[in-house]
Amino acid sequence: MSAWKWPAAPDGFSGPTMQWPGRDKLIVIGLVFVLVFCLTARPVLNAADPASSSSANPTSLAEKLFRDASAFSHALHERPLEERSVGDYRRALDAYGQVIRLNTDNYYSAESLARRAELLREMAYATGDSALYQQAIESYRAVVASHPQSAFVGDALITIAQIYEESLQDLDGAAAAYRELIFYFPSSMLGREAR
């Protein structure tokens, strides 16, 4: 049972040639086919299984910046109100501002605007600065204007009305905010309460 045969060499060739018997040739072709299939199918199979891929669900820049901003905010809120400095608020505000300026992810951008507005409102309350209430209103309005379909619109409009009514004693501003709330949510409980 010899697989090697020493046929006559063609002109200009001086080495041995190899001839495969039929069965061995089929086995080799089958192995080559399996090897080629496995090598080409492997990236596709890895893509279908995100747990096996090393780059599965990479954190976006917006998400990373949002997490950093949330960490600043969390550290700020761990301290009592009287121990919070304006600089601490500014660091958290700037961190949320980075997410807003990046504006690559609607969810993180909308939530960053809402959290930034809430921080401005807290800062206004802590310092008694009515200009900060105006900045908070502008930030809440940015949520409504930039992300009108987001889940933060209702809270933004309610908070605008509350700031006008309770903090600035501006009943006309509060009434306008309540009318806007009715416009956005005419048949909801929010709309009925605003009426």
Image (cartoon, helix red, strand yellow):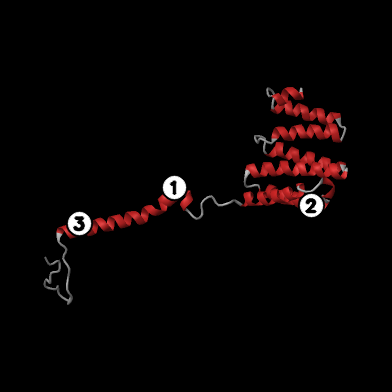
Q: Amino acid at mark 2?
A: Asp
Asked whether, in this view, residue 49 is left or right of residue 27, the answer is right
- Element class at badge 2: helix
The residues tagged by marks 2 and 3 sit, at their Cα atoms, a distance apart of: 74 Å
The circle on residue 48 is: 1
- Element class at badge 3: helix
* Residue 97 image point, x, y percent: 72, 49
Characterize the local packing of mark 2: few (<14), some (14-19) or many (20 or more) Cα atoms within 10 angstroms: some
Where is 47 relative to 149, above or below?
below
Characterize the local packing of mark 1: few (<14), some (14-19) or many (20 or more) Cα atoms within 10 angstroms: few
Tell me what residue is drawn at x 71 percent, y 39 percent. 143
Characterize the local packing of mark 3: few (<14), some (14-19) or many (20 or more) Cα atoms within 10 angstroms: few
Tell me what residue is drawn at x 69 percent, y 26 percent. 185
Tell me the residue that label 3 is attached to: 26
The circle on residue 88 is: 2
* Residue 112 image point, x, y percent: 70, 44
Quarter holding the C terminus? top right
- Element class at badge 1: helix
Q: Earlier in the sequence, mark 1 or mark 2?
A: 1
Tell me what residue is drawn at x 84 percent, y 43 percent. 124
Asked whether, in this view, residue 187 is left or right of residue 89, the answer is left
Q: Earlier in the sequence, mark 2 or mark 3?
A: 3
Which of labels 2 and 3 is toward the front? 2
Q: Amino acid at mark 3?
A: Leu
Mark 1 touches mark 3? (CB < 8 Å): no
Q: Earlier in the sequence, mark 1 or mark 3?
A: 3
Where is 107 relative to 190, above or below?
below
Q: Amino acid at mark 1?
A: Ala
**In the foreground, 115 or 171:** 115
